[in-house]
Image (tube, rainbow, N blue to C red):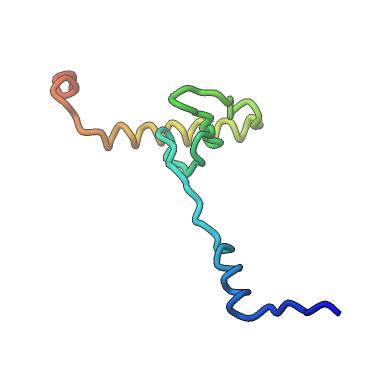
Amino acid sequence: MVIRMRSTRSHTRTRRAHHALREGRFLSCPKCKEPVLPHTACLNCGIYKGKEVIDVLKKLTKKERKQKEKELKAQEEEKREKKPLDAVELSKK
């Protein structure tokens, strides 16, 4: 007759010690500041390594496209406002 292996609390808990979930690793997109997984293109703006690889506006309807363009323009304006002015830009103004 086979001897039954016992599954004690300590055996069960040591086995389950490696079942913990890790926190996701996200970066922020340099253009739109949305959270993005590393080594993937941003689904919000379609940028990867500084180049547009996905045409995000192509899949949208006309109404959604206008709204998206407006959002992207607003984000660029905010980015320009936050940037400190240097001597060349001050001379232009």
At x 28%, y 35%, the residue is 81
Give how far across and how far down residue 91 sits, in percent: 14, 19
The quadrant holding residue 66 is top right
The answer to which of 22 and 53 lies nearer the viewer is 22
The answer to which of 79 and 93 lies nearer the viewer is 79
Give how far across and how far down residue 22 sits, in percent: 51, 57
The answer to which of 54 and 77 lies nearer the viewer is 54
Above or below, comparing residue 32 to residue 53 in the picture: below
Above or below, comparing residue 60 to residue 24 in the picture: above
The quadrant holding residue 92 is top left
Q: Quadrant of the C terminus?
A: top left
Above or below, comparing residue 80 to residue 7 in the picture: above
Give how far across and how far down residue 72 sits, in percent: 46, 33
Image mark count: 0
The quadrant holding residue 16 is bottom right
At x 66%, y 29%, the residue is 59
Q: Quadrant of the N terminus?
A: bottom right
The answer to which of 74 and 23 lies nearer the viewer is 23
